Image (cartoon, grey):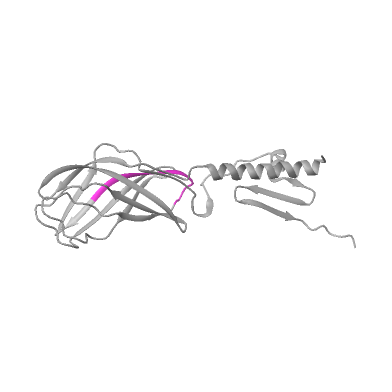
């Protein structure tokens, strides 16, 4: 086999291997996590435990993050009429990112009887990655506004992440410079031979052919 054909075969094999690794890599990992909430309410302190589920779905350049409560938290000494309760929450970011994001949702559609655990509707928000890597999403503070009062519920058991996403920053950058390679590495990675360059990667293979000037 000629050196030209051997270089082409190596570059093509590298492209296929890279694509296979990319396809098999996990994009998201979700886990329902029990969260122990300590709530500060207008009538005193209350506590509740609720399993929390957080899901992420790709949406444009970001992700739609949805937070779900599987059990009710806190309660009210009086009935909460339809549309009188407005919930919101923060989600703590970890891993490749940091800080918090806010998720919100619609007010309660049905009345909530007095002294009944308040079931929180699904809350959602948009997360736009600023860094590339694995980002974790962990339940943080829940806020309930109703009848002119505010209740805040804070996790006390240091819950683990409910979701881990493998994200790419907008524009595809990671904030770090790409590693430098030597001439030999570059020739293998790009599959350079003759007047043609083979760009191999998980996204596919692109051929760029340089037109040779004919002698006049």
**Within the magenta stretch, is there residue 165?**
no
Tell me which residue sits at (68%, 42%) in the image. 13
Q: Quadrant of residue 212?
A: bottom right
Depth check: give the residue in front, 53 or 189: 53
Q: Quadrant of residue 23?
A: top right
Tell me which residue sits at (22%, 61%) in the image. 109
**Within the magenta stretch, is there residue 141?**
yes
Q: Spot the residue most to the right.
A: 216
Depth check: give the residue in front, 120 or 197: 120
Depth check: give the residue in front, 154 or 204: 204
Most common SS among magenta residues: strand
> Quadrant location of the N terminus?
top right
Q: Spot the residue most to the top.
A: 157
The magenta-colored residue range is: 129-142
Depth check: give the residue in front, 131 or 204: 204
The x and y percentages for residue 114 are 10, 53
């Amino acid at each position: 086999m000629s050196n030209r054909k051997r270089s082409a075969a190596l570059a093509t094999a590298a492209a296929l291997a890279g694509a296979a690794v990319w396809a098999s890599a996990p994009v998201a990992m979700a886990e329902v996590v029990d969260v122990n909430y300590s709530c500060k309410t207008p009538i005193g302190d209350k506590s509740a435990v609720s399993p929390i589920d957080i899901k992420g779905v790709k949406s444009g350049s970001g992700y739609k993050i949805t937070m779900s409560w599987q059990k009710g938290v806190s309660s009210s000494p009086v009935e909460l009429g339809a549309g009188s309760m407005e919930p919101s929450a923060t989600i703590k970011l970890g891993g490749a990112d940091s800080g918090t994001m806010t998720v919100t949702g619609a007010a309660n559609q049905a009345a909530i009887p007095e002294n009944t655990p308040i079931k929180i509707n699904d809350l959602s928000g948009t997360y736009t990655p600023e860094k590339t890597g694995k980002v974790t999403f962990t339940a943080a503070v829940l806020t309930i506004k109703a009848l002119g009062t505010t209740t805040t519920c804070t996790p006390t058991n240091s819950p683990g992440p409910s979701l881990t996403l493998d994200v790419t920053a907008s524009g595809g950058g990671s904030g770090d410079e790409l590693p430098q390679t030597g001439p030999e590495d570059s020739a293998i990675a790009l599959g350079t031979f003759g007047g043609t360059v083979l760009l191999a990667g998980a996204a596919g293979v692109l051929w760029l052919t340089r037109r040779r000037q004919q002698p006049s």
